[in-house]
Image: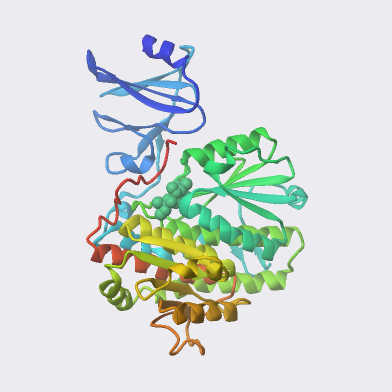
């Protein structure tokens, strides 16, 4: 351990390391340098475990300790001792992680992904319940550490995330603009951290992350903090690094998400952003109690709506049988549903390896329309919103070029009969909540296509559940 300490002093950047010596393989030395990239040490009975993220250990133990920046752990079969880089001993608490191993088992489903898709009515209720006050027309987010005065002082919100969580942020932009009238910027964490962002105390930095361990998100949060911005994380994994280092952490309460493709965490991100935007809208006096009550009543109906989308999967199986050999898919939508087109395309790419792209419908004629022929299925997402007629006209343009159109639209649509090849109906909700119901068909289309192609749905090639390295 002396040699390791000396070597660590020469490292730059962020590192999470485990070292084994051939001469003494019964002893592992682990270290963490920097504020990104975690090390979790699990305590079992006569055995110890090391991992970069908690879910990896759940089958073995729920008793875990976490290394902080500049700490070293010396781990043997019987336990661990901890030091700082300068050799000072550290006393580390063993925490019992409140994740239920039963909820991490497949429970009769063929894949974790299908289980997690099916859990969404419940996980969404868990995210909402206890946070809605219908009488006062208000939202209670106890974890929010900012005073009302501070919330009123924010001039801008900067939402930062990666992958699916970034798509949630894009929806969040619409929510904050609509419900709180606050300007919003959305950034990929892997880009934000290498820019020279202009941030200060009036800009609220919000990290959205399922794992709370994505290295680029953690480094971005560190950068925002150094620039003087208050930080908030919207996070699923309790006790994760993001939740520990941000000024406030709002939990998603989605339960453990095992499948690499994120599903229930995404819909809970949308719900949490909706609640937060409503809260800000109330505190900033942008919306009154009556409007908030209506918005909350609409939200409370969504879990059951999503439940109704789970009962019959036959349309997805039919689509998979028809289109599983296609090489490319196009997803189009407009407004607040445009990020759902991106999410649909990402889901398909990552688990089925079919190339897919998401576009705002209005962009078709600026380039992608050249791709359309009878070989390309086009998933078009609609809502009863201000851009409904525009997307219908985009569908007509795509059909005129021979495209196969799969329309995901609110039940009872009067305009699409005869214009599209397949219709997937979704329950009618408000414009701002339509991304929640429209997400479910995106997940099921991708899932059944991947299964039909014989792909490893839960462990797609080249991907990790949480990206703890660059
Ligand atoms: O844990 P995070 O939410 O920070 O992860 C971000 C992305 O890595 C993640 O959403 C990824 O894109 C998923 N594979 C999408 O299904």
Q: Position of residue 105 (x, y in %)?
A: 28, 54
Residue 229 sits in quarter: top right
In the picture, the quarter occupied by the C terminus is: top left
Left or right side of 180 for 329: left
Q: Is residue 131 visible?
A: no
Judge whether 412 appears above or below 342 on screen: below
Q: Residue 96 location in percent, x, y?
A: 39, 39
Q: Nearer the viewer, residue 414 or 201?
A: 414
Compared with residue 393, is residue 355 higher up or lower down, i.e. above or below?
Answer: above
In the image, 65 versus 391, the foreground residue is 391
How far across and down, in percent of the image, does residue 20 sit? Answer: 28, 20
211 sits to left or right of 287: left
The residue lying at 72 percent from left, 57 percent from top is: 182
Could you tell whether 374 is left or right of 111 in the image?
A: right
The quadrant of the rendering that contains the N terminus is top left
Q: 35 or 240: which is nearer to us?
A: 35
Considering only vertical position in the picture, is 203 above or below 283? above
Q: Position of residue 110 (x, y in %)?
A: 24, 61
| Residue 95 showing in the rendered view | yes
Q: Relative to 93, is 298 on the left or the right?
A: right
Residue at x 50%, y 86% (from the top left corner): 413
Looking at the picture, the colour scheme in use is rainbow
Q: Nearer the viewer, residue 441 or 449?
A: 449
Residue depicted at 74% across the width and 68% down the height: 288
> What is the total number of numbered labels drawn onto the structure image?
0
């Amino acid at each position: 351990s002396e040699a390791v300490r000396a070597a660590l002093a020469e490292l730059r950047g962020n590192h999470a390391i485990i070292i084994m010596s051939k001469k003494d393989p019964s002893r592992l030395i682990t270290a963490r340098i920097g504020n990104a990239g975690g090390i979790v040490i699990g305590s079992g009975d006569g055995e110890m475990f090391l991992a970069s993220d908690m879910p990896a250990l759940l089958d073995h133990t729920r008793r875990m300790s976490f290394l902080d920046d500049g700490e070293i752990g010396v781990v043997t079969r019987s336990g661990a001792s901890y030091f700082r880089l300068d050799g000072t001993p550290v006393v580390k608490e063993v925490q019992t992680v409140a994740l239920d191993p039963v909820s991490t088992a497949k429970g009769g489903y063929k894949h974790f992904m299908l289980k997690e898709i099916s859990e969404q009515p419940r996980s969404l209720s868990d995210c909402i319940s206890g946070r809605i006050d219908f009488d006062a027309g208000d939202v209670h987010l106890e974890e929010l550490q900012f005073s009302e005065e501070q919330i009123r002082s924010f001039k801008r919100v900067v939402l930062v995330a990666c992958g699916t969580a970034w798509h949630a942020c894009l929806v969040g932009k619409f929510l904050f603009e609509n419900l709180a009238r606050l300007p919003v910027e959305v950034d990929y964490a892997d880009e934000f951290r290498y820019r020279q962002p202009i941030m200060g105390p009036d800009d609220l930095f919000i990290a959205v992350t399922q794992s709370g361990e994505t290295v680029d998100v953690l480094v971005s949060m560190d950068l925002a903090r150094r620039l003087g911005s208050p930080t908030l994380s919207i996070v699923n994994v309790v006790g994760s690094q993001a939740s520990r280092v941000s000024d406030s952490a709002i939990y998603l309460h989605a339960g453990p998400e095992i499948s690499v493709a994120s599903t229930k965490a995404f819909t809970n991100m949308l719900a949490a952003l909706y609640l937060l935007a409503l809260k800000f809208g109330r505190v900033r006096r942008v919306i009154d109690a009556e409007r908030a009550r209506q918005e909350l009543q609409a939200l409370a109906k969504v879990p059951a709506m999503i439940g109704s989308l789970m009962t019959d999967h036959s349309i997805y199986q039919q689509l998979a049988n028809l289109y599983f050999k296609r090489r490319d898919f196009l997803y189009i939508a407009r407004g607040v549903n445009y990020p759902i087109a991106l999410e649909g395309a990402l889901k398909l790419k990552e688990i089925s390896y079919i190339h897919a792209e998401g576009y705002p419908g209005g962009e078709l004629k600026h380039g992608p329309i050249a791709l359309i022929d009878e070989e390309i299925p086009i998933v078009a997402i609609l809502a009863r919103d201000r851009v409904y007629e525009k997307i219908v006209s985009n569908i007509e343009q795509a059909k005129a070029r021979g495209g196969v159109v799969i329309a995901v639209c609110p039940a009872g649509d009067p305009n699409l009969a005869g214009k599209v090849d397949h219709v997937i109906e979704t329950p009618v909700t408000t414009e701002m909540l339509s991304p929640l119901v429209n997400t479910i068909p995106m997940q099921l289309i991708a899932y059944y296509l991947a299964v039909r192609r014989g792909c490893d749905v839960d462990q797609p090639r080249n991907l990790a559940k949480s990206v703890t390295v660059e």
